[in-house]
Image (cartoon, rainbow, N blue to C red):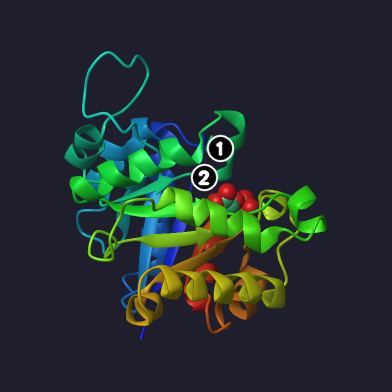
Amino acid sequence: MRKKVIAGNWKMNNDLNGTVSLISDLKKELNGNNVEVEVIICPPFTSLETASTLLKDSTIKLGAQNMYFEENGAFTGEVSISMIKSVGCEYVILGHSERRTIFNESDQVINKKIKTAIKFGLKPIFCIGETLEEREKGITFKVVETQVQNGLKDLSESDLSNLIIAYEPVWAIGTGRNATPQQAQEVHQFIRGLISKLYSSNFARQLVIQYGGSVKADNAKELLSQPDIDGALVGGACLKADSFAKIINAV
Ligand code: PGA
């Protein structure tokens, strides 16, 4: 059985004060009752150390929203893997569509980042998904396949034991328009089949594939009950403790 994984991507929200209040509200809402679900929060870099301290007595895990692939050096404005590890991160979101579109991250850059994450023992949440134009052209599977093949290039099954894939259709992110459970399930099933072809059916069966894109308390249950949807990557709805907790409780 795959464990359900619910991750909250705070994006560029919450300064330190906001971080302290959101985490304390979330801990109260969950009250330690989330043992059967892996819960992860991904605050901005500036809040990670504070978040890590606040989460010491909690089962909630910490992730970063990005990192650079080089280990250190003259890369002004970038943050390295040892930096995010040293403040308590266990996970890192890589290849988010906002990174791909606004910051021009290519599949090749994302592949390097995934390799760095694996080399240093961080668990990557690898995001993929098609735009509205690509869906309307009927090339969703092709787009997702290319992103998977390029993003995981030169990585073996044993490298990927801690990988999570997040399928996030770009047209559903922050738009209030989620994929229907059937639309999401269809792509998740395709991704699992692809992983089975590229690696093995055993590995594909164990791989956690999250859905992301306008997941909310009122649609989480139906999405998460699909056979190939193993969790959610939540943006907007994770910024309020009660709505994030409702999604977790929907599992
Ligand atoms: P959303 O964002 O839940 O606000 O649509 C999801 C994401 O970007 O990961």
38 vs 250: above or below: above
Q: Are marks 1 and 2 in contact (CB under 8 Å)?
A: yes
Which mark is on residue 100? 1
Give the x, y percent position of residue 153: 38, 51
Q: Residues within 10 Å of mark 1 (few under 14, many from 20)?
A: some
- Label 1 and label 2: CA atoms lie apart by 6 Å
Q: Nearer the viewer, residue 227 or 107?
A: 107
Residue 123 visible to an observer of this rendering: yes
Answer yes or no: disc 2 within 8 Å of ligand 1: yes
Give the x, y percent position of residue 87: 21, 39
Q: Left or right: 132 with respect to 163?
A: right
Q: Quadrant of residue 48?
A: top left
Q: Secondary structure at mark 2?
A: loop
Give the x, y percent position of residue 72: 21, 23
Residue displayed at 28% across by 60% down: 156
Which mark is on residue 37? none
- Three-letter amino acid code at the position of disc 1: Arg
Residue ID for mark 2: 96
Residue displayed at 46% across by 49% down: 150
Q: Left or right: 119 with respect to 93?
A: left
Q: Left or right: 206 with respect to 101?
A: left
Give the x, y percent position of residue 36: 34, 79
231 vs 213: above or below: below
- Three-letter amino acid code at the position of disc 2: His
110 vs 139: above or below: above
Q: Secondary structure at mark 1?
A: helix
